[in-house]
Amino acid sequence: MMEIELGEKILQAHNEITEKNRELLSRHGLLTVNLMGSPGTGKTSVLEQLIPRLKAKVSMAVIEGDLYTSKDAVRIEAEEIPVVQINTRGGCHLDGRMIAEALEQLPLPQLELLIIENIGNLVCPAEFDLAEDLRVSMLSVTEGEDKIAKYPLMFQDVAAVILNKVDLIPYTSFDVTAFYEDLRLINPKAPVFEISCRLNTGIDEFADWCVSHIEQKRADRK
Ligand SMILES: Nc1nc2c(ncn2[C@@H]2O[C@H](COP(=O)(O)OP(=O)(O)O)[C@@H](O)[C@H]2O)c(=O)[nH]1
Ligand SMILES: [Mg+2]
């Protein structure tokens, strides 16, 4: 009984903070994207490819979730956009309180797009609403297509899926057909962007998808 009550209280506190974050983000008209996936799937690499394509058209910032280091934030800083580092000190996901603190450090009135790189993990991030508009989940071919069926929460309720490292398909046993079959069982509609950060392919399509959502947000504000 005690445990359940405690869990409920923590969850309730998280939900209250998240609603405040949502109100703040919506007041400033930001489109917020929660980018999730395993460690090493290529989240930061995708951002490094995406930011140069978007930053001339869209005022954007990144929140970098990391366990202990600022290595990813340093990589994003090189793209010359605002970036805030959150270190969870071992915590396996970002939460509303961490996002609230990060938002305090960002120039919200000047921003249109906020991308949150979540902690590399295929389980916990899926369970925490970060007040995002869009969830994007990533899988890379070296992880294996079976991860869709094994971690369905991560892929079922997302607006888009990125399949990264497609340049490595010839060198792995990744089964593209099974990937799509398993994905469509749990998520029939989300667009899939097949990307290679190494070969620089597929990113333009993903950038266009982001821009179309930003344009929708601009239209909603009018
Ligand atoms: N071959 C190949 N390697 C990639 C690709 N994208 C990322 N990587 C490599 O995968 C590793 C992890 O990438 P990173 O962006 O740090 O992943 P994160 O932990 O999800 O942020 C790095 O060594 C990248 O160079 C890709 O499309 N193809
Ligand atoms: Mg990273």
Image (cartoon, grey):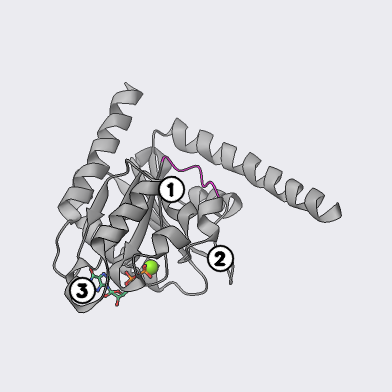
Whether residue 79 is visible = no
Please tell me which of labels 3 and 2 falls first in the chain: 2
Cα distance in 3D space between marks 3 and 2: 28 Å
Kindly identify which residue carries mark 1: 156
111 above or below 10?
A: above
**Any atom of ligand 1 within 8 Å of the CB at mark 3?**
yes
Q: Please tell me the numbered disc located at residue 92.
A: 2
Does label 1 point to a residue whose CB lies under 8 Å from ligand 1? no
Q: Main secondary structure of the magenta part?
A: loop
Query: Which quarter is ligand 1 in?
Result: bottom left
The residue lying at 28 percent from left, 66 percent from top is 45
Question: Quarter of the image containing the C terminus?
Answer: top left
Segment tinted magenta in the rendering: 128-133
Q: Residues within 10 Å of mark 3 (few under 14, many from 20)?
A: some
Name the secondary structure under disc 3: helix
Give x and y (percent) for residue 135. Answer: 41, 47
In this view, the residue in front, 90 or 55, is 90
- Looking at the image, residue 184 sits to the left or right of residue 120; the answer is left
**132 is within the stretch colored magenta:** yes
Which residue is disc 3 drawn over? Answer: 168
Question: Is the C-beta of the residue carrying label 2 under 8 Å from the nearest atom of ligand 1?
Answer: no
The reply to whether callout 2 and callout 1 are in contact (CB within 8 Å) is: no
Tag 1: amino acid: Gln
